[in-house]
Amino acid sequence: MTQFTEQHNPESAAHADPVAPGAPPQKQPAPRSGRLAFVVLAVLLIAGTFTIARRLTEKGALAKETERLAVPTVGVTKPSAEPASDQLVLPAQLQAYVESAIYARTNGYLLRWTRDIGSHVKKGELLAEIDTPEIDQELSQAQAARQQTEAQMQLAQSTADRWTNLRKTDSVSQQEADQQVSAYTQARANMAAADANVRRLQQLESFKHVYAPITGVVTRRNTDVGALITAGSAGQGRELFDVAQVDPLRVFVSVPQTNAPSIRAGLPAYIALQEYPGQKFTGKVVRTADSIDPATRTLLTEIDVPNPDGRLLPGSYAEVHFSVPIQITRISIPVNTLLFRPEGPRVAVVGADHKVHMKAISIGRDFGTKVEILGGLTPDDQIVVNPADSLEDGQEVNIKTGGGAQS
């Protein structure tokens, strides 16, 4: 009997699984593919849950962002306060403080003149002489007549004295004495009349010398040597000279009725002329008419401006600048904050609740980039800049931060 020697083969042993006789059967292990499927399923469940959770979170964030974007963001600004005084500029014309037209008071011919236009004269200085031959003759005749009247008065006086003494001795009647006394009284009246006539002609004789009535500048000379001079005034004769007092100068200006309450005596002002660019000539209000002209609705106001060096010329055109005090607080806003609605101009104001409130306003002056507000706003209001036409009252808004508002 041939015996075969079996060598031990580990690989074969691994595949062979002998079961001992009489031992209970062993349970076979689960296949590896089942375990892998379970792991894959668990991973898919976890990934799905994470994906769903992420999508829900993103959806909520998107909803919040959409809700936030639905609320418009606006820039705001506050009204700016205007100065407490207002610069009022009005046209005006310079006038001499005193301007005198000098007319002749007697007839004759101009003998000579001593001052021409532009001459600075003092009060009482001789300007011209007039030759008055007719007045000279009348004065000589009146003086002679006075001498006659004086002689007659002396005779009447001696006669009246004599008859009065005779009446004391009853040498003459009372009637005759009264007649002589009456003749003397009449002679004295004639003497007074003769004296008055002489004085009148002497005054006319004095008018042959034309004197400056004020200290100033000769602004016009309308006569020459040999010209016939006729006594008279405006409308009857031609003036010989015009003399003007140019220091100070008067400036008359018509102030609109809206500014009239702010104009009072002592209010400072200055004038500006084109021929003196950048220079200011200061003065002050000295008086007003205290009455509004119903034709122009203006207040006539006089300003006195010193002119010691004579640089300012009467008759010149000038601009008067007033610094008019304002009794109320004035504010202004940019023009790009206005909303023009059918019911009138409005501005959108953001309140403390971040909601828009439409406020009606009253617009004053237009400064170009800004407008004056006469009513409807307070200096603390937050006004929406460049408001959209779709902006409504009560709408919630966000306020832009960091960028500042455009004005």
Image: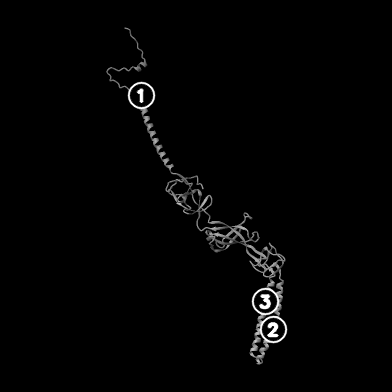
Q: CA distance from mark 2 to mark 1?
A: 178 Å
Q: Position of residue 338 (x, y in %)?
A: 48, 49
Q: CA distance from mark 3 to mark 2?
A: 19 Å
Q: Is residue 358 left or right of residue 34?
A: right
Label whose residue precedes the other's in the sequence (3 or 1): 1
Residue density around tag 2, few if under 14, some if 14–19, many if 20 or more, within 10 Å:
some
- Of the residues tagged 2 and 1, which is closer to the observer? 2
> Disc 2 residue type?
Gln
List the residue tagged with mark 3.
Answer: 197
Q: Quadrant of residue 184?
A: bottom right
Residue density around tag 1, few if under 14, some if 14–19, many if 20 or more, within 10 Å:
few
> Disc 3 residue type?
Asn
Foreground pick, 184 / 384: 184
Residue density around tag 3, few if under 14, some if 14–19, many if 20 or more, within 10 Å:
some
Res 33 label: 1
List the residue tagged with mark 2.
Answer: 154
Element marked by disc 3:
helix
Residue drawn at 36 percent across, 28 percent down: 41
> Disc 1 residue type?
Ser
Foreground pick, 348 / 134: 134
- Determine if residue 127 is in view: no
Residue drawn at 69 percent across, 85 percent down: 155
